[in-house]
Image: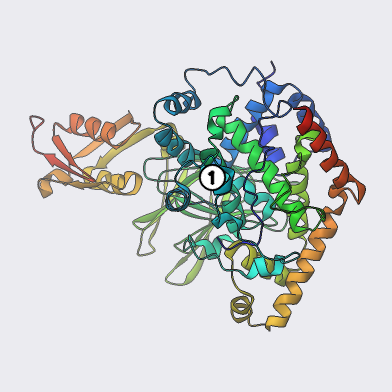
Amino acid sequence: MNHAYPFRPSPPDDPFSSRQNPSGGGSEPVSSDPEWAIRRAFADDPRAAFELLYRRYYAPLCSHAARLVYARDVAEDLVTELFVRLWQQEDYRRVSGSYRAYLFTAVRNRAINYLRWEHGHTERFDPDEAPDRPDLLADDPLAFEELAEQVNQAVGTLPPQCRSVFLLSRFEGKKNREIAEELRISPKTVEGHLTKALTLLRLALRPYWGCGLLPWLWAWGWECGCLVG
Amino acid sequence: MNSEFPQTLLFALFEGRATPLQKKLVREWLLEPANREAFCAALETYETEHPQYQADAEAGFRRFRAEFDEPVMAPAHRPKALRLRLGWGGWLVAASVVLLIGLGFGWRESVFQLRYETAFGQTRTLLLPDGSRVVLNANSTLRVPRFGFGHRTREVRLDGEAEFSVVHTQTHQPFVVKTARDLDVVVLGTEFTVFSRPRASKVVLKRGKVRLNYAVRSERRQLTLKPGDVMTLDPEGRARLQTTRRPETHSAWKDRRVVFEETPLSEIVQIFEETYGIHLELPDAGVARLTLSGAFTASDADELIRTVTDALGLGFRREGNTIYLTPSASD
C-alpha cells in the first residue's frame, strides 16, 4: 500500500448508528433482491458470501470514492480498507439495512474524511487513535455531492498544463520526475503545478470544512454520541 | 414511501448538474430513512453505468485475499499493511508515490477521457452530461472528454456500434462522433446509429440531419444524410449510400433483437465475432452463401444460434467460444 493516508484500523462510525441506517424500510429483505441472496449466503458460508459482496461492489465503490479523492490508488485503498473492516471485525454480522447502503454510506464517509485529512483540516486528529469523524453526511446527506462538485469545478478550472500534471500525478500515480519527462518541463515546474493545484483545491473547499471551531465541535459531538450509544 | 424518485434527477445530482432547488428536493426526500436505500441503489446503478474509472475487482480481490484474509477479532491484530503512512502535509509525497499495482494500460488516455465499454453480449445505455443518450452495443467502446463536455466540445470517439440521440444545445454546439476509419459524423441534434468495426463503417440516420466528413484515399469528402439514409464505408474506403424505409432495424440490437434482410451466413459469422466474441465454424463454403431474413429476439449467443440454425435447417455444437455448425439439425 503506497499512499500517505493514515488508514485507521477500526473507524467505529461505519453506518451502524441509527441516524444513518435506513431503519425499518431497508432491513426487510425482498426476495427478488440479490442483496437477499448475499444475506442468506452469509448465514451459510460467510467466506463465499463475502467474495460475492466484494466482486459486486468493489468497482462501483472505487469509482464513487474517486469522484471525491481524485486519486485512483487512494480510492482503492479506501474501499479495500472498508472491506477489510467488514471482514476482519466481522461487521457483516451487524449490517441491518442493505449491504449496499452500508458500503456506499461508509465509502462516502471515508472519502470525505480522507479529503478533510488531506487538506489539513483535522489538526487534532491522530489517525491511529481518533475514530472517524461523525460524518458530514449525518448533517447533510448530499455533502459528498457538494464537495465532489467543488472538487470537479476546481480541477476543471485549473490551467491546462497544471491540470495535466495534477491528473498524471493523482490518477496515474506518476512520479514528478516521470511527469516532467513526459511533459518536457522541469521537475521544479511540476512541483509548482502540483502546489498550485492543491492550493486552488484547498481554497475551493475551504467553506466546506467550517473554520477552526467546527471540527472540534464535531469531535466533541461524536464522543458524546458514542457514550450515549 | 416515495421511493419512486426520478432516477434522472438523482443522476443529474451525481453528475454535478443538479440545481439548488433539485438538491433541496432530494434532501427532503432523504429525510425518509427508507429512501436512503433507494438513493444508494441509484448510486450503484450510476457508478456501474457511468464509472469515473473502471476498477479491477479481480485484482482488488486477489490483493485482499493475499493480505487480509482471516477474520481477526482481537484489536491487537489489526491489519498492519494498511497503516503505512507518511508525515503530515505529505500530500506531495503521496502524489508522487507510485501505484505499483493495477496500472491497467489504456489508463493513460482515460485520464482525460471517460471510457465506457461493453463486454461481449452486453448492451448499455449512457446519459452524457449534455443530456444526449447513447446506447452502446456489445463489444464497443465510447470515449468522452472528462472536462468541458457540452461547453467546449461535444466530441466523442466510438469503436464498435452505438445508437445516438443527440440533444440540440442552446449554443448550437455540434456533436461529433469520431471513428477509427477517418469518418466523422457531425450533428446538431438528431437520432442515428454508427457502426465502426474493422469490417466496415456504417451510419444510419433516423431523424434530423447529419454531415459526414470522411476520406477516400486521403481525399477529404463531405456528405449530408437525410433520414433513412444508410452510408457504408468499407475497409478500402469505398463509400456506398443506400436508403432504408426502416432505419430502426439498424438499432434493433438495443432491444436484444436481430434483424436480417437477406443476410448471408458469412455476415452472421462476423456478427457473432463482433457481438459475442464467438467464432462460428462452417461445415463447407456452400453454407456461407445461405441467406436469412426476419426479425429475431435473442438474449444471448446460444439463443441466437439456435434460432439461426433452426431457420436454416442446420445443427450446431458449442465448444467454449467456438460453435461448429453441422449440416443437419440431427447433430
Examine the image and state in which quarter residue B1 appears.
top right
Residue B141: x and y in percent read 47, 52
Residue B89: x and y in percent read 76, 65
Asked if B103 appears above or below B73 in the picture, the reply is: below
Query: Which residue is drawn at the image coordinates 59% and 70% (left, top)?
Result: A174
Query: Which residue is drawn at the image coordinates 85% and 46% (left, top)?
Result: A215
Query: Which residue is drawn at the image coordinates 37% and 40% (left, top)?
Result: B121
Q: How is the image coloured?
A: rainbow
Residue B206 visible in the shown view: no
Describe the element under mark 1 as helix, strand or loop. helix
Badge 1: residue crowd in 10 Å (few <14, some 14–19, many ≥20): many
Asked if B299 appears above or below A5 in the picture, the reply is: above
* Residue sitting nearer the eye, A138 or A142: A138
Examine the image and state in which quarter residue A144 appears.
top right
* Residue sitting nearer the eye, B60 or B196: B60
In the shown orientation, is residue A221 left or right of residue B180? right
Asked if B96 appears above or below B82 in the picture, the reply is: below
* Residue sitting nearer the eye, A13 or B4: A13
Q: Disc 1 residue type? A: Val
**Residue under label 1:** A84
Residue B60: x and y in percent read 47, 51
Examine the image and state in which quarter residue B254 appears.
top left
Asked if A153 appears above or below A100 in the picture, the reply is: below
Query: Which residue is drawn at the image coordinates 53% and 18% (left, top)?
Result: A29
Where is the C terminus of chain B found, in terms of image quarters? top left
